[in-house]
Image: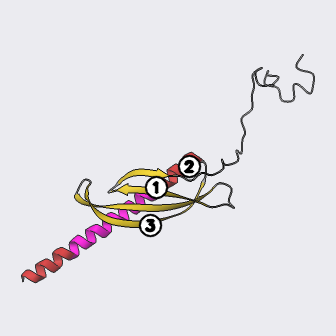
Amino acid sequence: MMTDFLMIAALVVIIAFFWQLRQMAELSRRFAHSECRKQRVQLLAIAMESARPSIGGTSGLTWKAKFMMEFSTDGINQYKASIWMHGKKVQKIQWPIFPEPEWLEAPEATGTIGGSCGGGSRGGCKSGGCK
């Protein structure tokens, strides 16, 4: 009778820990997606690199996990970043040095400083708009 109870309790604890790891994986995926959008890079993949039990968090017992994120700046080259989580909170993210992605719409100067003719006309210097 007592051994049945202990086995059921152990099974519940294992399921709870697995469930918490799945929640952390989903949160890290969402975080990685939003960070890649901020950095203007393409998220390729995210995977858990390591996890170990820890004390802290909201429930007392929780996990410390490290996630590896792969991303691309141009669709050809691939880079790896790391995300560290403690429970359901992201502790830090470590980006490698990577080239800035190409801008699809480069900003244009419209003032007189910086060599632009201003006036909002394109090609104003070529057409004799600046004197």
Q: Using the rendered view, name the quadrant where residue 66 is placed.
A: bottom left
Residue 108, given in percent of the width and then of the height, sits at: 74, 32
Is residue 129 depicted above or below 29 in this figure? Answer: above
Q: Residue shown at 67%/49% (left/top)? A: 101
Q: Is residue 19 magenta?
A: yes
Residue 105 image position (x, y, % from top left)? 72, 41
Rendered image quadrant of residue 54: bottom left
Instruction: Give the prevailing secondary structure in the magenta stretch.
Output: helix
Magenta stretch, residue numbers: 11-30
Quadrant of the snapshot with the C terminus: top right
Q: Which residue is mark 3?
A: 49
Location of residue 53 with respect to 119 vertically, above or below: below
Residue 100 is situated, as x and y percent measured from the top left of the image, at: 66, 47
CB atoms at circles 1 and 3 under 8 Å apart? Answer: no
Instruction: Please count the marks in the image.
Output: 3
Within-10-Å neighbours for mark 2: few <14, some 14–19, many 20+: few
Q: Amino acid at mark 1?
A: Arg
Which numbered circle lies on residue 30?
1
Q: In the figure, is residue 32 to the left or right of 21?
A: right
Q: Residue at x 51, y 49 (%)?
A: 35
Mark nearer the viewer, 3 or 2: 3
- Which residue in the structure is indicated by mark 2? 37
